[in-house]
């Protein structure tokens, strides 16, 4: 009798135990396959970034992570479904939570969207000198949310990507050869050709000024008290600031040595004696 009761208990719980064991084994199989697929998808997306050199690898690392976690989310839902969990309510809950988080992080999401656009269109890259969002410096890092600049006085400036993408971006390193615009004025009584010859000599002797394209030196404006030259030598981009901050001093000294006056602003006042 006791043996019959024991057999009855085993037969009663055996189907449930087999069902649970089967679900556990299937869940493990689904999890392992899901992990493998997620890893393969992540690697595939990252390999696309290495294949297309024109696009930044940071973007593909981010997209690879998004793809991996998306696959893992579906895998988690499939595993829960094996144990009879109603996944529809979980999906709805996750959707509501995602909406709430998205609304709470609107600023971060705008920076993320701007970061994606910057990494796709690449208006600048690491190592470029840019002027944007009211700051100027060398780009040291670009990530999904911020761009980091190093200024000339060695400060680190972290700019949210949304502030850069929504404004004008000046990339001073985009072209290999650059022109350096400078202005110099001489008095009306001075000889224009002599002044031009002095300026040309300084530019010709400068080691970083290119011969081709040739420097541009012409009269640009006839001001109230001076004749103004526009001087535009061309150079490699790396020498831009060297020329910008060295040539004006050299030209000033050369004009002084040649006796060519650089006038101060002045006005001529004529007094009329109406009594006479």
Image (cartoon, grey):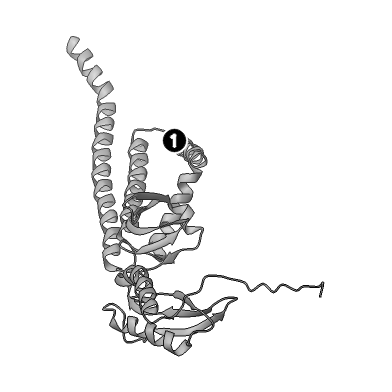
Q: Is residue 226 left or right of residue 241?
A: right
Q: Quadrant of the N terminus?
A: top left
Residue at point 34% right, 40% down? Answer: 76
**Residue that extends furthest to the top in the rendered view of this protein:** 1
Residue 145 in view: no
Q: Nearer the viewer, residue 18 or 40?
A: 40
Measured as percent of width and height from the top left, residue 38 is found at 28, 50
Residue at point 54% right, 77% down? Answer: 226
Secondary structure of the residue carrying tag 1 is: helix
Residue at point 39% right, 32% down? Answer: 85
Compared with 222, 26 (above or below) is: above
Measured as percent of width and height from the top left, residue 162 is found at 47, 53
Q: Is residue 43 left or right of residue 88?
A: left
Q: Residue 245: which quarter of the image?
A: bottom left
Q: Is residue 151 left or right of residue 260?
A: left
Q: Quadrant of the C terminus?
A: bottom right
Measured as percent of width and height from the top left, residue 205 is found at 28, 82
Compared with 80, 230 (above or below) is: below
Give the residue pinned by disc 1: 90
- Please give the count of numbered marks on the rendered protein: 1
Q: Is residue 139 left or right of residue 170?
A: left
Label 1 CA crowd tier, 10 Å (few <14, some 14–19, many 20+):
few
Q: Residue 241: which quarter of the image?
A: bottom left
Q: Residue 58: which quarter of the image?
A: bottom left
Residue at point 48% right, 50% down? Answer: 110
**Residue that extends furthest to the bottom in the rendered view of this protein:** 193
Compared with 241, 197 (above or below) is: below
Q: Nearer the viewer, residue 250 or 8?
A: 250
């Amino acid at each position: 009798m006791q043996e019959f009761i024991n057999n009855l208990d085993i037969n009663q719980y055996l189907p449930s135990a087999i069902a649970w064991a089967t679900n556990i084994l299937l869940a493990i199989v689904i999890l392992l396959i899901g992990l493998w697929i997620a890893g393969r998808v992540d690697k595939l997306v990252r390999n696309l970034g290495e294949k297309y050199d024109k696009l930044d690898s940071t973007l593909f690392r981010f997209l690879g992570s998004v793809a991996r976690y998306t696959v893992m989310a579906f895998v988690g839902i499939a595993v829960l479904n094996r144990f009879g969990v109603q996944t529809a309510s979980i999906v709805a809950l996750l959707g509501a939570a995602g909406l709430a988080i998205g609304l709470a992080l609107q600023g971060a999401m705008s920076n993320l969207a701007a970061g994606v656009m910057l990494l796709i269109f690449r208006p600048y890259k690491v190592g470029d000198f840019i002027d944007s969002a009211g700051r100027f410096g060398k780009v040291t890092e670009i990530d999904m949310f911020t761009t980091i600049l190093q200024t000339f006085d060695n400060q680190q400036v972290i700019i949210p990507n949304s502030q850069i993408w929504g404004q004008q971006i000046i990339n001073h390193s985009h072209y290999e050869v650059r022109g350096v615009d400078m202005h110099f004025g001489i008095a009306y009584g001075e000889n224009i050709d002599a002044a031009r010859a002095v300026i040309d000599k300084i530019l010709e002797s400068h080691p970083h000024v290119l011969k081709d394209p040739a420097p541009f030196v012409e009269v640009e404006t006839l001001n109230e008290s001076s004749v103004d030259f526009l001087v535009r030598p061309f150079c490699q981009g790396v020498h831009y600031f060297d020329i910008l901050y060295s040539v004006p001093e050299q030209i000033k000294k050369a004009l002084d040595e040649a006796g060519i006056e650089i006038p101060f602003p002045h006005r001529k006042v004529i007094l009329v004696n109406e009594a006479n």
